[in-house]
Image: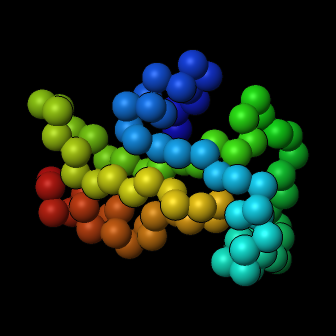
Amino acid sequence: MLIDERRVAYDAAGLRSGGILELLRPFNLAARARAGREGHRQHRIGKDPFQLGGTFVLAPGDRDWFAHRSGTFGDVAEIDAVLAALARNR
């Protein structure tokens, strides 16, 4: 996990911010409900609660094996896709 308070990597990776209205989209409501059922709770809001994340698998030599940029809240990379990228590039 990378925490990027100055948002240097965030900008370089082309990550974006979500908006307040996105919180009300059906996809996001369903994702929040699913997370709650699974026992996940949001405990603290950081400096920019609207910053969206991403999942990246990077390799030496400026190679990226996998990149997923979240399009909205609750949009996370499928673990099978991440594991497949690792398996392909061993």
Is residue 74 left or right of 55 when viewed as pictured? right
Residue 74: image location, x then y, percent: 64, 64
Residue 82: image location, x then y, percent: 35, 62
Question: At 32% across and 47% down in the image, what residue appears?
Answer: 57
Q: Is residue 34 visible?
A: no
Q: Nearer the viewer, residue 48 or 88?
A: 48
Name above or below for residue 28 compared with residue 6. Answer: below
Question: At 61% across and 22% down in the image, what residue appears?
Answer: 5
Name above or below for residue 60 compared with residue 79. Answer: above
The answer to which image quadrant residue 51 occupies is top right
The answer to which image quadrant residue 83 occupies is bottom left
Residue 21: image location, x then y, percent: 76, 62
Is residue 49 left or right of 51 when viewed as pictured? right
Is residue 85 left or right of 26 when viewed as pictured? left
Q: How many marks?
A: 0
Q: Nearer the viewer, residue 63 or 69?
A: 69
Q: Nearer the viewer, residue 33 or 85?
A: 33
Question: At 37% across and 47% down in the image, what residue appears?
Answer: 56
Question: At 25% across and 61% down in the image, what residue appears?
Answer: 85
Name above or below for residue 9 compared with residue 17. Answer: above
Q: How is the image coloured?
A: rainbow
Is residue 34 left or right of 75 when viewed as pictured? right
Residue 32: image location, x then y, percent: 77, 70
Q: Is residue 59 visible?
A: yes
